[in-house]
Image: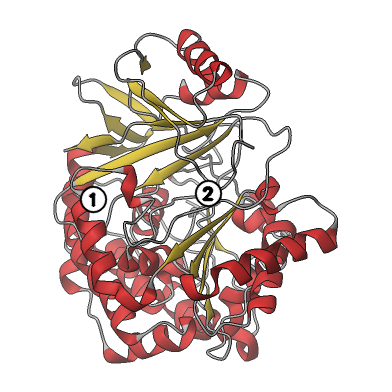
Amino acid sequence: MTSPSIAVQNYIGGRRSDTESRFVMTSPFSTYSEPYRFSVELPNSTTREIESALGHGKNYRRRKIDPSTLLDVISSAGESLPIEESEIAYAVKLTGLPTKVVRANLMGIRDYMKHFGNIIRQRYTVGENGVQRHLTNGSVELRVPIDDSVVGYLPFGDLFPPIFVISHSLISGRDVLVRPSSSMAYFSVKLAEQLTEVARKMGGDLSGGINTVIWKSDDQSRQTNSEMINLETTPESRLGFGNSATLKALGVGIAYDRGSCKAIVDEGADIKQSAKSVADGALENPLACDATRLVWVHSSVAREFEEALKEEFAKRKVGDPLEHDTDIGFVDFNDLQKTLNLVTDNARWGSEKLLYPEVDIPKIRVGEYQGLPIILRLYNLESPLVRGDRNVYMLHVRHFDSLDRAVQEISSPWLPHPLTVSYYGPEDKKGKEHTLELARRLPASHVNVGKNTRVHDLALPHQGKYPFEIWTNPISISS
């Protein structure tokens, strides 16, 4: 029997390879018609080790297993995942981040991974028909549709799903595309080893069944992450590609965007080059990042960076940065512990304050939207620093011309229901009318309106340029 094919494909400059076009994963974070590129990092500096561990060939004979056995294997992975000084040193060199930040990042991943098997066991069932989610009312829904050529899985943090997806691929025989992101930068070889061990315990030989497609350029391997989204990551510029785990460790990595493309601009960065890199990435690499960019900027260079970014977009004559969904946030890198404490405290009750850390550094948006439709973004406020099995989500809906997409998206089965719609923005008649209209057009089981609908004038820097913003209240998905 022919094995499933798992392609590990780097995106460079937004170009898609012929190989990659064979594989499509359906996004649970959008309508099912839009593709989602599954994220796992396999740095090319370890190409030979990865190929050695994963191997090549199409003679693997898969065998059925009990899903609980697979969960046992996954949940034990965190216990055996070592954190070596060499891994920390490599991460520091790769990102230019302080050693203490990287160490917190790695420790957080390891600690959280210990909980992973139990989380999945309590909420999901893996079988030959796909991945199913257990609802709070006791029923079960098919979380990700799977057909003869597609395997998909709900992302549970960039580190863990690759193990689950690939394992499920081995079970089901489906094809899967694995797209790089920096979250796996420190665990590439160990991931390969883990997958091999998972396959061995499943009764199969992974080394004979996985086809890897890895960009071949050992000389440039250290820059693969930056080239993927055109971000310079040299220590001189100190503009780091902010992988989601590092950002979480900083207390600011709370935005989960399709593609998970984030950046950090620290003090001492080359501001003009940083702005150019962000603009290039946002405009020229939509395949890798779904045309989104979350940029966290040190307060000391924030205003300068904002102006430089506007200039870069003006040069390209493509409108303002927000037209391409570029979000700018500030964080005080000099008070890391305070930020960590804030993220821990706030995550306990899932406050939107996590998006606006109380360090006197506001999160702002630059530019102005013009005629855009509804844009949805899922904010995952879960932090590896917070013990316990819980996810807290907030859904951000910005409305301009039409409510059609909002109704369509909020009705999607992947959202926990009911939602409570909150309205943020100028307290004008139009805003309230549209908020109520949104509620009227959704099933009663999908949204709560009334006393739970809050209206706030946040006096944001857009100064009334946005018609209004709608957020759901924090949604806690408890075990």
Task: Identify the element where label 2 is drawn.
Answer: loop
Amino acid type for the residue under numbered disc 2: Arg
State whether residue 191 is above or below residue 85: above
The answer to whether residue 15 shows anywhere in this view is: no
Disc 1 element = helix
For image coordinates 15% across by 69% down, the residue present is 79
Q: Is residue 394 visible?
A: yes
Towards the viewer: 148 or 159: 159
Q: Which residue is mark 2?
A: 258
Tags 2 and 1 in contact by the CB under 8 Å rule?
no
Q: How is the image coloured?
A: secondary structure
Residue assigned mark 1: 346
Tell me where residue 159 appears, x and y as whole percent. Answer: 36, 62
Q: Earlier in the sequence, mark 2 or mark 1?
A: 2
Residue 349 falls in image quadrant: top left
Specify the label residue 148 is tagged with: none
Percent position of residue 179, x then y:
54, 60
Residue 376 placement (x, y as % from top left): 53, 36
Q: Quadrant of the C terminus?
A: top left
Relative side of 111 to 315, left or right: left
Q: Is residue 258 above or below residue 30?
A: below
The amino acid marked with disc number 1 is Asn
Give the residue drawn at x 52%, y 49%: 258
Left or right of residue 436: residue 389 = left
**How many numbered circles does the render carry?**
2
Residue 81 sits in which quadrant?
bottom left
Q: Nearer the viewer, residue 406 or 452?
A: 452
